[in-house]
């Protein structure tokens, strides 16, 4: 008898050792993923590395990694290895559908011994992709208590069932992987934001070049030609010189005015020194007279100040809204209104132009590559303001920004 019990003990030890070895292998595999993965490789490469390490470590033959898409409330097969392979990639299921949905919605791992008789299993996936899933172990990808996806490992190569140790191992692996995935996503977001800012900067530079070319540069050419002509006039017809000089003075003043407007647009110093209301007043004074458009100001506020970043964002929104009215509206009058109440300052830009269908413009935004409306919204969020765009074809457009005067303290928002 003692012999038998000592053999069991030895067997137990061997099993524990093998489990430990598998755990160490899993951690090493993940460390390897973290080391080889460089942010520039992109999220999909990272997901593929994570999945293939998990399939190897679990000694399985297939697997898939799904990420949650909060916009559609669906799980997306991001990477699939073995089994139904690439065909399944980017396919979507509801976030509570199938075994992955079960794991996702309960944030719990699961072992399935025979998928064919498990009511949660989506037979259509195997049917459609001509694969037979028998055993499966799946774990949620949890980051800061939020489930961001699911990793599924399918069919052990040995044909054995998955056991609770396998499940624990996958769960630990999934937890570490979720951190890597979130970091890679953050990096992607930062890169996308940087590219967007670079695109905006490029556009601003182009616009400035266009304005300089069409405005002051043309005027200065005219002044130079006028001066050459003036030389001849002085020799031949001195009596006409005075009229020519007056015209040259008019052109030079106009060029100076345009350059000052551009400087103001680039860096409205009044915004920093006197605040948003004064800056809007100066902006209106400078703009009127430049075009046929009538730009008017309706204000009952003057000395309200906000944080510099709020004033900068609000002023940019006004500039973009007036710019849009000039560019697109074919309006006769644009009115900037600045109204104060006990809780808020309301800034609005109203034009009597042709208006537009806001919903369809916003829907087509991704393909159009315009940035104006999007920038306005982002800036409004930045200054904790509320932005609304009211427009209808034929009925003009009103862009309204409401800035809270006493922003509630962040701690008060906790409940
Ligand atoms: N005041 C307005 N009147 C009429 N149409 C407008 C007005 N404002 C915006 N639009 C419409 O909405 C679209 C999107 O505006 P948005 O400011 O995002 O882009 P844009 O002005 O064309 O380009 P960008 O601002 O990036 O230089 C415009 O192309 C135009 O069709
Ligand atoms: Mg615009």
Image (tube, grey):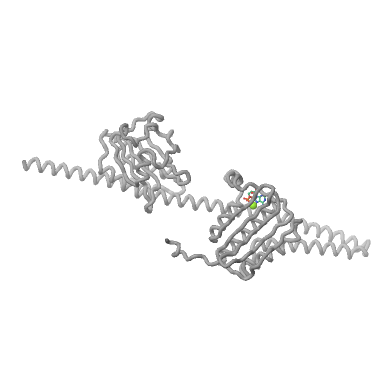
Q: Relative to 38, is 211 on the left or the right?
A: right
Q: Where, quadrant-wise, is the N terminus in this rendering?
A: top left
**Where does residue 165 sit, x and y in percent of width and height?**
25, 44
Does residue 217 show up?
A: no
Q: Nearer the viewer, residue 308 or 386?
A: 386
Picture quadrant where residue 102 is located: top left
Q: Is residue 154 toward the left or the right of residue 1 in the image?
A: right
Residue 389 in view in this figure? yes
Dividing the picture into quarters, in which one does residue 78 lie? Answer: top left
Vertical position of residue 24 compared to residue 125: above or below: below
**Which residue is drawn at the image coordinates 45% and 49% (left, top)?**
185
Split into 4 quadrants, where in the image is the C terminus? bottom left
Identify which residue, 120 or 290, lies in the foreground. 120
Q: Position of residue 349 (x, y in %)?
A: 66, 58
Name which residue lies at 35% across and 35% down: 121
Closer to the camera in the image, 166 or 32 = 166
Question: In the figure, residue 388 lies in which quadrant?
Answer: bottom right
Residue that lies at the very extreme toward the front in this rendered image: 342
Query: Residue at the left extreme?
Result: 1
Residue 390, horizontal then vertical, whole percent: 62, 52
State how many labels appear.
Answer: 0
Q: Position of residue 271 (x, y in %)?
A: 63, 66
The residue sitting at 47% across, 66% down in the picture is 409
């Amino acid at each position: 008898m003692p012999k038998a019990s000592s053999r069991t003990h030895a067997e137990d030890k061997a099993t524990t050792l093998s489990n430990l070895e598998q755990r160490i292998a899993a951690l090493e595999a993940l460390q390897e993923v973290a080391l080889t993965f460089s942010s520039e490789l992109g999220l999909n490469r990272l997901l593929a590395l994570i999945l293939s390490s998990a399939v190897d470590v679990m000694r399985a033959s297939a697997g898939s990694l799904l990420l949650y898409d909060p916009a559609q409330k669906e799980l997306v097969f991001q990477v699939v290895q073995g089994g139904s392979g690439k065909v399944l990639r980017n396919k979507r299921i509801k976030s509570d559908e199938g075994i992955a949905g079960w794991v996702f919605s309960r944030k719990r791992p699961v072992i399935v011994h025979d998928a064919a008789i498990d009511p949660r299993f989506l037979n259509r996936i195997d049917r459609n992709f001509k694969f037979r899933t028998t055993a499966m172990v799946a774990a949620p990808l949890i980051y800061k208590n939020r489930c961001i996806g699911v990793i599924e490992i399918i069919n052990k190569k040995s044909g054995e069932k998955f056991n609770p140790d396998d499940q624990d191992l996958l769960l630990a692996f999934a937890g570490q992987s979720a951190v890597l995935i979130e970091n890679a996503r953050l990096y992607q977001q930062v890169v996308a934001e940087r590219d967007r800012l670079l695109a905006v900067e490029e556009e601003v530079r182009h616009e400035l070049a266009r304005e300089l070319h069409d405005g002051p540069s043309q005027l200065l050419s005219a002044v130079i030609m006028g001066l050459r002509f003036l030389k001849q006039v002085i020799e031949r017809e001195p009596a006409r010189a005075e009229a020519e000089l007056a015209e040259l003075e008019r052109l030079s003043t106009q060029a100076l005015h345009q350059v000052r407007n551009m400087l103001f647009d680039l860096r409205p110093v009044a915004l920093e020194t006197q605040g948003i209301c004064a800056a809007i007043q100066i902006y209106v004074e400078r703009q009127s007279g430049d075009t046929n458009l009538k730009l008017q100001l309706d204000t009952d506020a003057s000395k309200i100040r906000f944080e510099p970043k709020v004033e900068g964002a609000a002023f940019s929104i006004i500039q973009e809204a007036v710019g849009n009215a000039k560019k697109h509206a074919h309006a006769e009058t644009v009115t900037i209104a600045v109204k104060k109440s006990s809780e808020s300052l309301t800034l609005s830009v109203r034009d009597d132009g042709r208006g537009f269908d806001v919903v369809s413009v916003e829907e087509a935004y991704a393909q159009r590559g315009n940035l104006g409306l999007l920038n306005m919204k982002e800036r409004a969020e930045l200054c904790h303001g509320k932005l609304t765009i009211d427009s209808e074809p034929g009925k003009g457009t009103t862009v309204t920004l409401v800035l809270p005067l006493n922003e509630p303290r962040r701690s008060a928002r906790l409940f």
